[in-house]
Structure formats: C-alpha cells, structure tokens
Image (spheres, rainbow, N blue to C red):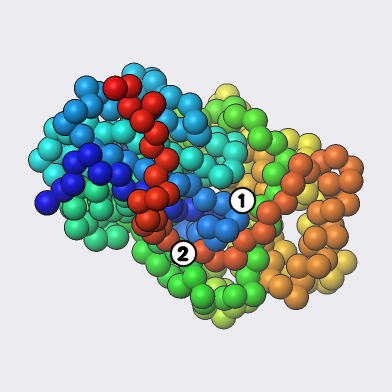
Amino acid sequence: MMALDKVFTAEGSPNIALIKYWGKRDERLILPCNSSLSITFDRKAMRTVTSVMFSKRLRKDIFYLDGKKQDLDDKDIKERFAIVEKMRRIAKTDARVAVVSQNYFPTASGLASSASGIATLVYVINKALVLGLSTKEMSIIARQGSGSASRSLLGGVVVWNKGKRHDGKDSFAQQLFKEDYWPELIDNIVVVSTGKKKVPSRAGMRATVNTNPLFKQRASSAQSRLAEIKKAFKAKDISKVAECTIADSNEMHALMLSTIPSIRYLNAASYAIMDAIEELNAMEGKTIAGYTFDAGPNANIITIRKYQGKVTRVLSQLEKRGMISYVKTSGLGEGPRMLPESRSLIKKSMLGR
Ligand code: PMV
C-alpha cells in the first residue's frame, strides 16, 4: 500500500557519456538513433537529493528545484514532469505530489543535472508509490523524461541500448561493469563555466537530425566505436578507452557545428583543455588521458590513478591562466539509493498550507 503524507528521500548521481547520444528516432518516446555508453559519477563528487510526498490534501503538484519554486506550466518543465503523471497512472492514484530536489553541482550547465534529477525522481517515486518496478522498467520511464537519465539508474559502466521496437520497450540502460570494476579509473570533472546552456539538448538534437546531412553516418560510426570501447573496458586499456572517448566527443561536436544553424557549446577554455590534453598525450608518446564534452563547455578528463598527477599538473596550469573555475574528481559510482526520513528536504512552508 502506498503511503500518503509520508516523505520519501533518495539520492542519485549524474553520468557522463563516453559514446554519446545525440539525435532521436522518436521524439515523443525519446528513442535514440544510436546506443550510448556512460560512467556513473560517485555521489561524493556530484549528487542530487530528491524528496517526494504524495498527498490528497495538496491542491496541486509542487516542485522546488535548488530552493526555487518551479512553474509547472513552463513547457520544458511540464514535458519532463510528465513522467510523474505516468507513474501516478501506473499506481492508479490521483494524489498530488510535492517534489523537492537539490543538485549539489551547477544545474543546466552541461553537467547532466537532468539525468541525475530525473533518475532519482523515478527511483524515489517507485518507492513512494510502492510500484515495485525493476531497474529496466525505471530506466524506460526515466528515458522519457530525458534520454541520458535512463543511464543514471545504474552504477558503474552503463550501456543504453537503442532498441529497435516502435514502442520503446527494448530501449533501456544496462550495467556493463559494476562500480568496483576498475578502482584506478578517475574522471576529472572540469568546470569552466556555470552558466546556463545556450541551446537545450532537445532542440539541438532535433536541428541536427533535420538539417545535417552528416548525421546519416552517425549511427554506424557510434555503433562500431561502442564495440571498440566495450572491448577496451574489458581489457582495462586506458589508452583505447581515452582514444574512443576523444573521438566520440569530437564527432558529436562536429555534428553540432555543422548543424544549420550551427550549434556550438565549446568555448575558448574548452579548446585550451583539448590542446593541453593532446599535448600531454603527445609528450608521453601514448594516450594517457581522454577528454569529453556534453552540451556545454565543461570538460570531463578520464585517466587512471598512475597518470592522475600529470593530468592534475596540466589542469592546474590552466587554472592559473584563469581558464578553469574548479576541478572535481570521481571514480565509478553507484546507482540511486534511499535515504532515511530525517534527510527530507520538504519544509512545511513549501506546501502552501
Ligand atoms: O538526455 P539529454 O536530453 O540531456 O541529452 C543528453 C545529450 C548529451 O549529454 C550531449 C550526450 C549524452 O549521451 O549524455
């Protein structure tokens, strides 16, 4: 039985795609044109905490994000909040919900806050409404809020299989390797800008699919690179993992650049980071670190522990030149988990009673 007027709280973390998803074959169901692969961040580096409370006493849904009340009539928010309605339908309830979510990293700056936020929301509602959904089922629901969210329901190294079906029932994320698989692996989350995204990913993807003739190549190229990076993870071969990561990030940003009108998320600091990592690899005579960028100028630099000192030196030089605001490091993290009731973020004043 679902518990009304009781607060449930969970935490989850973002993921960074090393093989990118950019372009949908179905916009309504959020079905991608290619499969993607990501690593889930450790909650110690970045996390989202979300509390929900379903109640018949609430007149309407309430949503607070990072301390600010959100307008649920706003198109973008409404689209993402539709997953709540979907879960309510599964539970056959019309109880309204209060959702309070806090990101412990900059929101909407290309740091995958939507992935972490939506995955954590689906996870906590599954508990609150006692739906008993499997991770696969939760991943399918999260996917419909934001594609990349499908991958944040799992920890470690994750693959979101694009699937073939029209109803999307075979398009969900699965764990490839658990969070303890490669303890030496380190991701440096490099924040160069905490500003809002220029072009939302939905609009950007749509423009790429509709206007870019180069996009035709993307699915087969991503598919073969996915096979290559899977092998590299299996062999714990950092050079291959990093090379695939660099190539895929550059391929996605080249597609964005050649979209009409052109979409450019990278800035001078992003290019300075790319130069610095490529110089480092050239000096070493092998690839010891790889960079990747999502829909924003911030970088993720992956490497392994024995090379981390060298990567840190390069990044701190860029920091001295004012190119970087800060760097956080993360290993492979776990999927979402429940927190005790005492960690509730819901305050009486938010409920408007
Ligand atoms: O899931 P969305 O709509 O936030 O799109 C994510 C797109 C990228 O972050 C650029 C790539 C990816 O696979 O995460």
The quarter of the picture where residue 248 lies is bottom right
Residue highlighted by disc 2? 334
Disc 1 residue type? Ser
Report the residue that reaches farthest toward the bottom. 235
Q: Please give the name of the residue rendered at 72% of the width and 51% of the height, measured from the top-left corner.
A: 327
Instruction: Give residue 304's position: percent from left, percent from top.
Output: 69, 71
Q: Is residue 282 above or below residue 89?
A: below
Q: Please give the name of the residue rendered at 21% of the width and 57% of the height, measured from the top-left corner.
A: 133
Q: Please give the name of the residue rendered at 84% of the width and 57% of the height, measured from the top-left corner.
A: 314
Task: Locate the C terminus and report the quarter of the image it occupies.
Answer: top left
**Circle 1 — which element?**
helix
The quarter of the picture where residue 99 lies is top left
168 horizontally vs 274: left or right: left
Disc 2 residue type? Glu
**Circle 2 — which element?**
loop
Q: Ligand 1 within 8 A of label 1's CB?
A: no
| Residue 289 visible, this orientation | yes
Give the label on residue 249, or none: 1
